[in-house]
């Protein structure tokens, strides 16, 4: 039996980044694999876009961030500001989601029109084992998660109040540009 999940992805920070990123995601689980498909449009063009599902390790239901999460009033919702409603970064949608190695350079890059497609078939046993190692459970609980797409061009002027740098990756890489609630179909 196939389990199916989807998310309608809507823009976040669009008034500050100059484009309203949007798209969709689907997740199909069958025969110990998860097929992931993410389609995005109107993202900042020619830019690498980190994308992940976020959630709470205790199983609390995650919600999408809105402008209400801009607690410091700088006009941007940055990565740390999403955590109160969306939880923590969990699984990356990069070259190897089952490795759960979030900071890396294997995420999709948008084309000259600001579009990209991401497709990956993930071995579920490996993903669940790594998820259990990190979060103490192997239950992905996709319908309690949200998906985020991040990334703006390095030359976009951001206020110094934006937080979210991870290692060598600055706030341009981690700034959320779109978000969607994952639901069971």
Image (cartoon, rainbow, N blue to C red):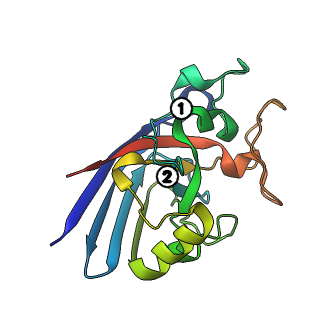
SS at mark 1 in the image: helix
How many numbered marks does the figure carry? 2
Query: In the image, 37: left or right of 153?
Result: left
The answer to which image quadrant residue 39 occupies is: bottom left
Query: In the image, 175: left or right of 87?
Result: right
Q: Nearer the viewer, mark 1 or mark 2?
A: 1
| Image location (x, y in percent) of residue 75 | 66, 22
For disc 1, the marked residue is 14
Could you tell me which residue is drawn at 32 percent across and 81 percent down?
A: 32
For disc 2, the marked residue is 114
Near-viewer residue (133 or 17): 133
Note whether 16 is above or below 42 in the view shown.
above
| Image location (x, y in percent) of residue 73 | 70, 17
SS at mark 2 in the image: loop
- Can you say which quadrant of the picture contains the N terminus? bottom left
Q: Is residue 153 visible?
A: no
Q: CA distance from mark 1 to mark 2?
A: 13 Å
Could you tell me which residue is drawn at 36 percent across and 67 percent down?
A: 36
């Amino acid at each position: 039996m196939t389990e199916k999940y989807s998310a309608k992805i809507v823009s976040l920070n669009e008034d500050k980044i100059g484009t309203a990123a949007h798209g969709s995601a689907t997740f199909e689980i069958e025969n110990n694999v998860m097929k992931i498909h993410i389609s995005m449009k109107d993202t900042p063009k020619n830019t690498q876009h980190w994308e992940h599902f976020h959630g709470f390790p205790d199983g609390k239901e995650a919600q999408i961030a809105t402008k209400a999460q801009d607690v410091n009033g700088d006009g941007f919702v940055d990565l740390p500001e999403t955590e109160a409603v969306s939880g923590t970064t969990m699984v990356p949608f990069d070259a190897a989601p089952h490795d759960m190695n979030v900071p890396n350079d294997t995420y999709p890059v948008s084309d000259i029109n600001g579009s990209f497609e991401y497709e990956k078939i993930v071995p579920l046993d490996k993903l669940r084992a790594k998820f259990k190692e990190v979060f103490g459970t192997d239950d992905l609980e996709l319908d309690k998660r949200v998906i985020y797409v991040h990334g703006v061009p390095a030359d976009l002027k951001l206020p110094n109040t934006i937080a979210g740098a991870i290692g060598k990756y600055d706030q341009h890489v981690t700034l959320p540009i779109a978000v969607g609630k994952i639901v069971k179909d």
